[in-house]
Image (cartoon, helix red, strand yellow):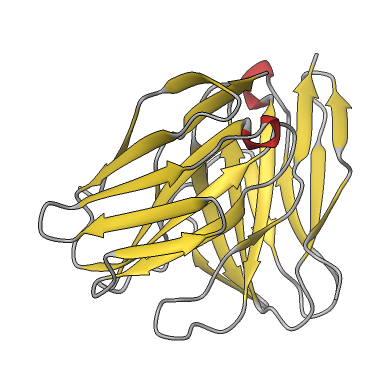
Amino acid sequence: KNQVEQSPQSLIILEGKNCTLQCNYTVSPFSNLRWYKQDTGRGPVSLTIMTFSENTKSNGRYTATLDADTKQSSLHITASQLSDSASYICVVRSSGGSYIPTFGRGTSLIVHP
Amino acid sequence: NAGVMQNPRHLVRRRGQEARLRCSPMKGHSHVYWYRQLPEEGLKFMVYLQKENIIDESGMPKERFSAEFPKEGPSILRIQQVVRGDSAAYFCASSPLLAGGRDEQFFGPGTRLTVL
């Protein structure tokens, strides 16, 4: 069964600090992995997409990593800002014919001033 | 190019009434997905549609729920005889034709359904 597990479930940090969110998946065969940011009361917005051959990808202060061997991904946020407070969702898509991606439950990040 | 549009943004219904949620995909997108999100929960897939076709409805309850994506007009998610457990945020996402699996799903702002 395809599954995506995220940790921690929630995280509170001070503004300016860095943090790392984790995503483990069992989706097979693997096609790609996306990290989404979901602000409260809004729909998710894609931050990065990683394919099998990509180890690291950055989008501003967001850096995603992928280890396809261990089936793990991380999202590192540098110099956090108040606007980073949101839920971060890891989504994995299989290349096995299903058009339906598998969603993690998300990590809720709160950045305090 | 407007994003995915959903309406209404908030919907209040009494038990037993019908709820009708609308989704207009991004221009040029022919694939629509519906998801449900309960408070403190992740997004749960409900149904995947293309124009005039239901491709995968494996996540949608067999009773009371239906979805359509007509040739003209928005996609509709219909919930008949709503119950309190249907209270949730319902998100629609659209994507263009598949391109090697890298197609991104663009999400709408969601419809928050409250059943009294």
Residue B87 in the image: above or below residue A25: above
Which image quarter is the C terminus of chain B in? top right
Q: How many marks?
A: 0
Using the rendered image of the protein, determine whether residue A35 is visible from the camera's viewpoint: yes
Towards the viewer: B75 or A84:
A84
Residue furthest out toward the top: B116
Image location of residue A40, percent across then percent down: 70, 31
Pick the residue in front: B51 or B62. B51
Q: Residue furthest left?
A: A69
- Image quadrant in which the N terminus of chain B is located: bottom right
The answer to whether any part of residue A4 appears in the image is no
Is A38 rendered above or below residue B84? below
Residue B112 in the image, given as x and y percentages of width and height = 77, 32
Q: Is residue B116 left or right of residue A64?
A: right
The answer to which quarter of the image holds residue A96 is: bottom left
In front of the other: A20 or A37: A20
Name the residue: 60% across, 24% down: A111
Residue B19, image x, y percentages: 80, 37
Q: Residue at horizontal 51%, vertical 75%? A: B103
A34 to the left or right of A55: right
Q: Residue at x 63, y 43 (%)?
A: B65
Question: Left or right: B3 with respect to B89?
Answer: right
* Residue nearest the observer in this picture, A7 or B80: A7
Q: Position of residue B78 (x, y in %)?
A: 73, 46
